[in-house]
């Protein structure tokens, strides 16, 4: 730990949340997220609307983050921002804003990979949350991502498995849409699953080699199943909603746990850190906990506000890169397909 006070202002705008956070020496002073409600009526994120909303939100969100932290712009040591991956129009808003602010204040600009940030969120200084020891496996599961990453150190990480089509959050959201649930459907499926029988209906798990995932076939399987059942009983969904939700969730959890088991076997690493919005799912949390007894692994879940898209996770990466003097050039560009 350094004796100097390092203040990082971080900006995240990769998808549909405009977020800003202020960090002092690894501790979060403020973490502001403006979630864009506009997408709910479309049942998914509309990129063009997301960019516009970021444009509207970014200055007030940054202002709020600084005020809440009680930090002046003149005290900032560096500006960190999400360079990618994400929606290009969304990334451009945060990138341009961060570049201008760093230029105006004449302080370093630090580019951050959003996927690395989901993982390094575990290293934000927080009481009562244990940090995973290196090496560990990180599973990032959200509406936009599904990855298993072998993490050897802060900046030495390798993706060992990822989805070849939909993300796991989409499997929840698209299945929910078929059932007439609102967007995003993940939390509602979770709630209903607690009241239903997970073995009421069976959905075949996709067969994907190695550690990769596929969820597009699963969504189609749910679609055909619902169509067939509704033909026989038009009230099938209403009559069985909790059981259908429980069965869908049970299958998805099975897919994730099977891959984690394989990943721990292949790598010999038994520390598992999870992140992303889907890690809020109570069934997944329970299955991971059960695995501690059954498979001998140890699991790490960060504070909830650091698991969904947020700028605190961008701040911790900014801080770690600041300590290494790893800054971005002024001509750095947003990159929608940035890799770990
Ligand atoms: O990380 P996040 O807020 O945004 C990105 O997608 O990057 O994740 C949102 C996703 C949505 O697909 C939502 O349905 C899912 O996380 N989600 C859940 C739960 N809470 C949020 N999925 C299952 N169970 C939940 N409790
Ligand atoms: Zn994310």
Image (spheres, helix red, strand yellow):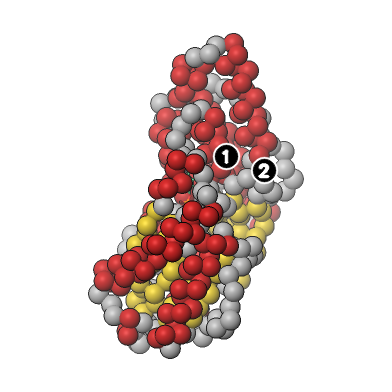
Disc 2: which residue: 214
Q: Which quadrant of the view contains residue 170?
A: top right
Nearer-the-camera pick, 39 or 320: 39
Measured from the top left, where is residue 34 in percent x and y? Answer: 37, 57
Name the residue nearer the viewer: 220 or 45. Answer: 45
For residue 253, above or below residue 276: above
Q: Quadrant of the N terminus?
A: bottom left
Asked whether mark 1 and ligand 1 are closer than 8 Å, the reply comes as: no
Residue at x 53%, y 68% (from the top left corner): 92
Identified at 31% across, 70% down, the residue is 63
Q: Is residue 209 above or below residue 231?
A: below
Q: Secondary structure at mark 2?
A: loop
Q: Earlier in the sequence, mark 1 or mark 2?
A: 1
Secondary element at image label 1: helix
Q: Residues within 10 Å of mark 1 (few under 14, many from 20)?
A: many
Give left or right: position of 180 versus 269.
left
30 left or right of 14 in image: left
Name the image quarter holding the C terminus: bottom right
On the image, numbered disc 1 is attached to which residue?
Answer: 171
Q: Residue 321, position in %: x, y? A: 50, 78
Q: Residue at x 49, y 14 (%)?
A: 235
């Amino acid at each position: 730990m350094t004796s100097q006070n390092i203040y990082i202002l971080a900006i995240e705008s990769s998808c549909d949340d405009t977020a800003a956070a202020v960090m002092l020496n690894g501790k979060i002073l403020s973490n502001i997220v403006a979630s864009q409600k506009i997408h709910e009526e479309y049942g998914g994120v509309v990129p063009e609307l997301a960019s516009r909303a970021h444009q509207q939100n970014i200055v007030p969100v940054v202002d709020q983050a600084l005020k809440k932290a009680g930090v002046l712009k003149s005290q900032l040591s560096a500006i960190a921002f999400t360079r990618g991956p994400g929606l290009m129009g969304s990334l451009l808003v945060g990138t341009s804003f961060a570049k201008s602010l760093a230029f105006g204040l004449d302080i370093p600009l630090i580019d951050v990979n959003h996927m690395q940030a989901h993982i390094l969120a575990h290293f934000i200084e927080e009481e009562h949350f244990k940090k995973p020891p290196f090496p560990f496996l990180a599973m990032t599961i959200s509406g936009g991502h599904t990855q298993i990453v072998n993490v050897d150190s802060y900046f030495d990480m390798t993706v060992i498995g990822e989805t070849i089509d939909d993300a796991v959050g989409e499997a929840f959201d698209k299945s929910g849409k078929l059932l007439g649930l609102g967007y995003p459907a993940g939390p509602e499926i979770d709630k209903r699953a607690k009241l239903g029988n997970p073995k009421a209906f069976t959905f075949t798990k996709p067969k994907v080699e190695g550690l990769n995932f596929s969820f597009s076939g699963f969504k189609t399987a749910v679609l055909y199943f619902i169509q067939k059942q509704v033909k026989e009983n038009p009230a099938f969904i209403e009559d069985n909603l909790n059981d259908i939700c429980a069965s869908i969730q049970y299958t998805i959890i099975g897919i994730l746990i099977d891959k984690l088991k394989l990943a721990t076997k292949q790598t010999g690493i038994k520390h598992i850190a999870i992140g992303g919005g889907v890690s809020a799912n109570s069934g997944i949390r329970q299955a991971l906990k059960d695995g501690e007894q059954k498979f001998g692994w140890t699991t790490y879940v960060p504070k909830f506000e650091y698991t969904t898209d947020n700028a605190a996770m961008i701040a911790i990466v900014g801080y770690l890169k600041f300590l290494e003097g790893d800054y971005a050039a002024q001509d750095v560009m947003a990159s929608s397909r940035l890799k770990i």
